[in-house]
Image: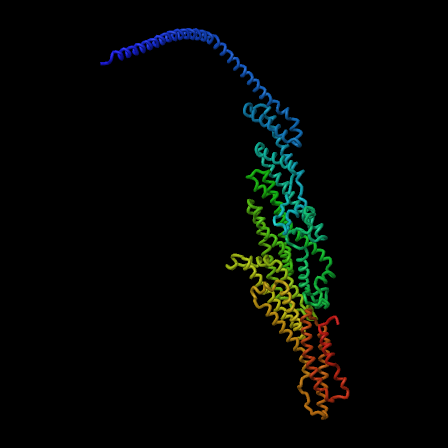
Amino acid sequence: MIPTEDASARKREIEEKLKQEQETLSFIRENMEKSDQLTKGMVSILSSFESRLMQLENSIIPVHKQTENLQRLQENVDKTLSCMDHVISYYHVAKDTDRIIREGPTGRLDEYLACIAKIQKAVEYFQDNNPDSPELNTVKARFEKGKELLEAEFRSLLTRYSKPVPPILILDAISVDEELEVQEDVMLEHLPEAVLQDIICIAGWLVEYGRNQDFMNVYFQIRSNQLDRSIKGLKDHFRKNSASSGILYSPAVQTKRKDTPTKKAPKRPVFIPGTIRKAQNLLKQYSQHGLDGKKGGSNLTPLEGFDHDLRVKHLSDALTEKHGAAAGKDDVLDIEIDSYIHCISAFVKLAQSEYALLAEIIPEHHQKKTFDSLIQEALDNLMLEGDNIVSAARRAIMRHDYSAVLTIFPILRHLKMNKSDFDATLQGTAASTKNKLPTLITSMETIGAKALEEFADSIKNDPDKEYNMPKDGTVHELTSNAILFLQQLLDFHETAGAMLASQETSSSASSYTSEFNKRLLSTYICKVLGNLQLNLLSKSKVYEDSALSAIFLHNNYNYILKSLEKSELIQLVTVTQKKAESSYRELIEQQIYMYKSSWVKVTEHLTDRNMPVFQPGTKLKDKERQVIKDKFKGFNDGLEELCKIQKGWAIPDKEQRDFIRQSQKRVVSDAYRSFLQRCANISFTKNPEKYHKYRAEEVEEMIERLFDTSA
């Protein structure tokens, strides 16, 4: 059982909690009542507000709709007025733009194009809305007038500001300075920048709005004329200046590089005026068989070791004396060749710059065709000039003037060097345009190869004419001309080799390698030398004196050998003829031996043959004394005769001349001294001085004067 106190306490606790809960419940009821009252008040207020809002809405909405309608009406009115103003403006376009269109676009292109745009819009409006209106015809006529004036402005700007490129600037552009690792590009400005932008703008408008391509024809005609004039101006520059100054250097380049005065002048396309022509002058004399009507002219190109005191004239001396006027013509031809070579390089450079200019003005899909038309006149003139050179060479070859091929060499080499630039520049042009340069190169190679072959044949078949033989047995003009010709080939060995290779049809020639071309040229040079040797051998038989014949062959063989050794021709010859040098030395030695045999008729009198045998102190018989007298007389007469004859012969090579003199002097002197010693104690005459005319020293002095035409 729970104790009574605990139960009482528990009861009191429960009663207190109950009392508290009742108070809380009473508080909640009071609050609920207040909340209900407030809710009822708010609902009443909201109901009143809703009623008033509905009344306001019912009165405002009709006003709003009416205002909105009024605004829409106002906007329609404004739009209608604006459209009316816009339409009316089309009717006034012709009048508003009349002054500007009449005055043209010069000096105000932007304003003019804006007027054209207005006229164009008017045309479009009338075409769409009132195609039968007279105003359409008016604005159409105004648009066409505006377009014509734009075309005229395009032509006027191009004509007024397109000028030929000055020759000095062209020379700067094509110059090559080997000391500069990176070449400076000389910019060719054909049009002022502001003018160029106007032209570009007009061209763009004509393409997009004018639907006109005639301006492209105008463009290529004007620029083609300027390109051709630029190249002709360069030619005139050469004619005026090259004759006096030799090689042209650009003042512009010199001014630009004042800070480097030690630099060499920039090199132009490879050609030195006069070098080819000098060789041609010499070779032309070959067909004339002698100089100034004199027989036996000695036409040597001076070589190291040859005695220039001899009366051996270089052909250029004779040309100076007799052919001064012809030399002037040759100088002109030098300038023409040099000019043509420079014009080839100039064409490439100018054409490249023309394409760069054209690319800014002409639409892309018309550029190649326009460029093709633009370069035709200048290119045709260059090719025609090249064809004329080929034709002149062909006529010269028909006259057996094979020196004409030397004119072709520098030109052909330059054309082939620039072919890749040509091809790149003409890329995209018509096939007929691209083929012009290869056709010219082929023509030059063909005529050049023909000249080379005919020259080799002419060396072989040169007639043995007595009046054309040098009387002193010196080098024949045929030899000097042939060597000179071959030396000129050496300067253009790659071109000459390619020339010969171009005529090959064998399978081995299918790929013209440098080595193959070199072997062909070596074979050709050996052929010329072989033909020359055969011809010289034939010519030597013209001489009645076998000793002079030997001297003649000796001089020619020695001249050939020295010329080969002095130049690099010997390296080319040995490509196919390994023993060429030793072969010539053997030939020279053979001719020296043949010459020495001419002295046998002198020295044979000094031998013991028929010499009487006697004892010392015994008296000689008349017959025996006569034998000794005959020996002395035969020696004296033979010595005097040979010295008189051979003194007028020539051996230009001092080394060879001294060698032959010393060798012969030693042989004759030794034999003579021995003979005098044998006859020293023999009394064979009462007048010994009559027979013993010369001392041994005097004999040596006489031989020492051999081959001395100045004595």
Up-down relation of residue 254 to residue 620 (above or below) = above
Residue 167 appears in the picture as rendered = no
Quarter in which the C terminus is drawn: bottom right
Q: Nearer the viewer, residue 592 or 90?
A: 592
Q: Quadrant of residue 189?
A: top right
Identify the colour scheme used. Answer: rainbow
Q: How many marks?
A: 0
Q: Nearer the viewer, residue 588 or 119?
A: 588
Q: Residue at x 59, y 56 (%)?
A: 445
Residue 199 horizontal/vertical position (percent): 62, 36
Residue 651 appears in the picture as rendered = yes
Up-down relation of residue 428 to residue 120 (above or below) = below
Residue 403 horizontal/vertical position (percent): 65, 59
Up-down relation of residue 14 to residue 622 (above or below) = above
Residue 37 horizontal/vertical position (percent): 39, 6
Residue 215 horizontal/vertical position (percent): 61, 37
- Which residue lies most toward the bottom here? 618
Up-down relation of residue 328 to residue 537 (above or below) = above
Q: Quadrant of residue 645?
A: bottom right
- Which residue lies most toward the left here? 1
**622 left or right, relative to 135:** right
Q: Quadrant of residue 212?
A: top right
Quarter in which the N terminus is drawn: top left
